[in-house]
Image (cartoon, rainbow, N blue to C red):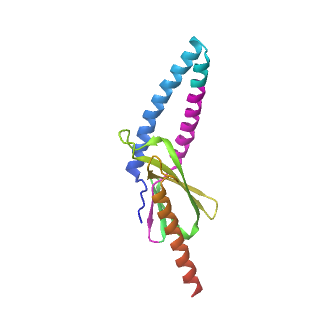
Amino acid sequence: MDLRLLTLPEIHKVHFYRLITLVCLSVIGVMTVFALLEKTTTEAQVFALVVLVMLARFGWEWVTVSRCTPVFVLGDELVLAGEHGSRRVPLTQVREVTSRHAIFMTRRYRSWSEHLAFMQLTLATGERIFTLAESGVFEFPAGKITLAALQAVVLEAKTRSLTASAR
């Protein structure tokens, strides 16, 4: 199983590079506003709409990254290791594992192959746990190797739990 989940130092790198991305998008936004104030053309309006969509997506990713915690699998438990302590969740409590692409969030700007995927683990109680995983640019679904590995680990833990309770 190949779990490519990000560790706490790698998540800190993502936080650093998202600040750089925020600065770049802010500069683009300010330049677009000045272009609209100077002369309102159809091209400037279309570009402003594209920038607005980019800023909205970046805002959603910013909030999602803020909720992400480092996660790793230890035996039949999911360990959430954050700055405020750690927490263990049995894998049998995981109801669903999904992923989404991160467009603006990266670990490094120099590499197109090191993009990120948002992993969402939904527990039986309805609680959602967010973490980050490595993903290729055109992988579908996002982070497909890690997604498949997490789903397999959860299924294996649930199978073991059911066979143990049947005995």
Q: Tell me which corner region of the image, top left, top right, bottom left or bottom right, holds residue 44.
A: top right
Residue 83 seen anywhere in this rendered image of the structure: no
Q: Residue at x 49, y 68 (%)?
A: 77
Name the one closer to the observer, 100 or 89: 100
Q: Is residue 37 left or right of residue 3?
A: right
Q: Is residue 60 above or below residue 155?
A: above
Residue furthest to the left: 110
Residue 17 in percent (x, y) is at 41, 38
Looking at the rendering, which quadrant does residue 38 occupy? top right
Q: Is residue 13 visible?
A: yes
Residue range highlighted in magenta: 48-75
Q: Quadrant of the N terminus?
A: bottom left
Q: Could you say which is closer to the camera, residue 147 or residue 66?
A: 147
Please indicate whether residue 100 sits to the left or right of residue 21 in the image. right
Q: Residue furthest bottom?
A: 167
Residue at 47% x, 54% y is 143
Q: Position of residue 89 (x, y in %)?
A: 52, 65
Answer whether residue 29 is magenta in the image: no
Q: In this rendered view, identify the residue nearer to me: 127 or 41.
A: 41
Specify the principal SS of the magenta part: helix
Classify the position of the C terminus by image quarter.
Answer: bottom right
What residue occupies the far top of the structure in this picture? 38
Q: Name the one closer to the observer, 85 or 95.
A: 95
